[in-house]
Amino acid sequence: MGLGSTAGPAAFAQPGPAAPNPVLVIGGFDADHGILEKLREALDGWGYSAYSIVLPAVPSLSGAPTGSAPIAESAGAVAQAVDEIRRETGAARVDVAAHSMGGLAARHYVKFLRGGESIGTYVDFGTPNSGQSLGFLCSLFWPGCRDIAPESPFLRALNEPPAVPPGLVAYHLFSEDEGPEREPLPGAINASVQAFCPGRHVIHRDEPRDGAFQELIVSALRGGPLATGCP
């Protein structure tokens, strides 16, 4: 699909019956679990069996942030969570809604850890798929920062074509207010929240609790078309 397709505005319809797959919400670097829970709770309200995780941290006396571990290690944590959800629910597949670095961990899981056999719909939002230059600032301290820095060995391997494995239904959602996440994900449906809600200001950290982002994620999990009423 080359650079992927771009979605345009559509009217948001109130969700009908939830998709059969449970949903795993995945946080990013230094994730605020309270903000992450806003998305999980919203998905619960729409009838999904929703779960959430934060990425692992490097053990540190100073208290390392979540996502500071190598992203490949975080992908292992995603794999473990998906396996646990499948055992608990009996579902054959789990959908993912992964924020920021969480999208990189989820995509590594799908691409290199046979996650495509267990994932239904893949949605990343606010994910800097080509890297985040702020990673250079903390790369001396945390492996996760080294991995998310542009042109890192981790990202070169992850983005080697195909960036999205064939057959995976994938979406990349982003805010035009945030630079690195605007880079399209090849093979995915790419869309900004501002394409649906012109003038809307959403900072990176607030994306999981933003109502328009939540509705776009739900419409993606339902198989599209992407839509929101811009609450």
Image (cartoon, grey):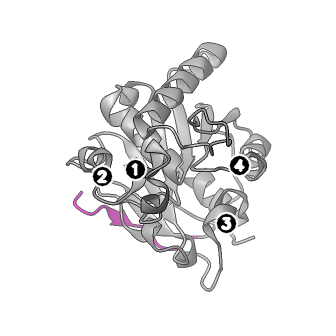
Indicate the amino acid at tag 4.
Leu
User: What secondary structure is found at the residue carrying circle 4?
Assistant: helix
User: Can residue 223 be spotted in the picture?
Assistant: no
Q: Is residue 55 magenta?
A: no
Indicate the amino acid at tag 3.
Ala
Q: Which residue is mark 1?
A: 146
Tell me whether the residue at label 2 lies in contact with that at label 1, contact meaning CB atoms closer than 8 angstroms.
Answer: yes
Q: CA distance from mark 3 to mark 1?
A: 32 Å
Quadrant position of the C terminus in the picture: bottom right
Crowdedness near tag 2: few (<14), some (14–19) or many (≥20) residues, C-alpha within 10 Å: some
**Residue ID at (45%, 40%):** 105
Indicate the amino acid at tag 1.
Arg
Q: Which residue is mark 4?
A: 36
Residue 118, image x, y percentages: 44, 25
Question: Which callout, 4 or 3, points to the residue nearer the camera?
Answer: 4
Label disc, if present, on residue 123 of the rendered structure: none
Query: Mark 3 or 1 closer to N-term?
Result: 1
Residue 159, image x, y percentages: 27, 50
Tell me whether the residue at label 4 lies in contact with that at label 3, contact meaning CB atoms closer than 8 angstroms.
Answer: no
Q: CA distance from mark 2 to mark 1?
A: 7 Å
Judge whether 19 appears above or below 229 on screen: above
The secondary structure that most of the magenta stretch takes on is loop
User: Can residue 90 be spotted in the picture?
Assistant: yes
Q: Which residue is mark 3?
A: 212
**Residue ID at (69%, 64%):** 206
In the image, the segment drawn in magenta is 1-10
User: What secondary structure is found at the residue carrying circle 1?
Assistant: helix
Q: Which residue is mark 2?
A: 152
